[in-house]
């Protein structure tokens, strides 16, 4: 349920960013590129089954058992960002990939030609 609310919120923010890009650049192509990159970025963060990937990599070929899923359930009052705390490598990879993508997107969108 929380993931659905996060997805809806992210898509609403993406729509606002697309509207700002469209109004400031008057370019349908830049709006389309913003939409595609935004949806791919949102999907990269919200769609993966983190319970599956948060296990040791030797267990990845096997389905998640009920016992493993129950052990991975977060505390009801826990922050949704705590899932990133267990993997600094994942945070570093996301920061590098998304940072570069946003840098390239901004360079393209802010180009006046």
Image: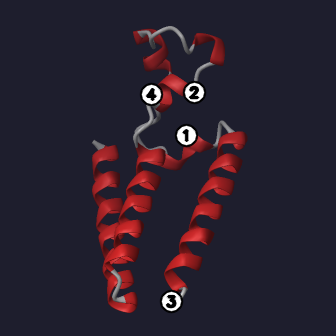
Badge 1 local density, few (<14 within 10 Å), some, or many (20+)? some
Coloring basis for residues: secondary structure
Does dot 4 land on a helix, a strand or a loop?
A: loop
Task: From the top left corner, tell me how far across and down residue 98 is, in percent.
Answer: 59, 58
Q: Is residue 79 visible?
A: no
**In 3D space, how far apart are the residues under numbered discs 3 and 2 (Cα atoms)?**
44 Å
Sequence-wise first label, 4 or 1: 4
- The image quarter containing residue 104 is bottom right
Badge 2 local density, few (<14 within 10 Å), some, or many (20+)? some
The residue at 46%/35% (across/down) is: 75
Sequence-wise first label, 3 or 2: 2
Q: Which mark is residue 64?
A: none
The residue at 48%/47% (across/down) is: 45
Sequence-wise first label, 1 or 3: 1
The N terminus lies in quadrant: top left
Of 108 and 77, which appears nearest the observer? 108
Sequence-wise first label, 4 or 3: 4
Q: Is residue 80 visible?
A: yes
Task: From the top left corner, tell me how far across and down residue 92 is, in percent.
Answer: 71, 49
Q: Which mark is residue 83?
A: 1
Residue with the mark numbered 4: 73
Which label lies toward us, 1 or 2? Answer: 2
The residue at 64%/63% (across/down) is: 99
Is the residue under label 1 in contact with that under label 4 (CB below 8 Å)?
A: no
**In 3D space, how far apart are the residues under numbered discs 1 and 2 (Cα atoms)?**
9 Å
Is the residue under label 2 in contact with that under label 3 (CB below 8 Å)?
A: no
**In 3D space, how far apart are the residues under numbered discs 4 and 3 (Cα atoms)?**
50 Å
Residue with the mark numbered 3: 113
């Amino acid at each position: 349920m929380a993931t659905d609310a996060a997805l809806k919120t992210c898509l609403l923010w993406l729509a606002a960013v697309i509207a700002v890009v469209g109004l400031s650049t008057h370019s349908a192509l830049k709006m389309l590129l913003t939409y595609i990159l935004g949806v791919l970025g949102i999907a990269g963060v919200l769609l993966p089954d983190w319970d599956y990937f948060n296990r040791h990599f030797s267990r990845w070929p096997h389905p998640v058992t009920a016992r493993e899923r129950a052990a991975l359930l977060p505390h009801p009052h826990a922050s949704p960002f705590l899932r990133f705390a267990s993997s600094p490598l994942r945070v570093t990879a996301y920061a590098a990939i998304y940072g570069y993508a946003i840098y390239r997107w901004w360079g393209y969108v802010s180009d006046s030609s």
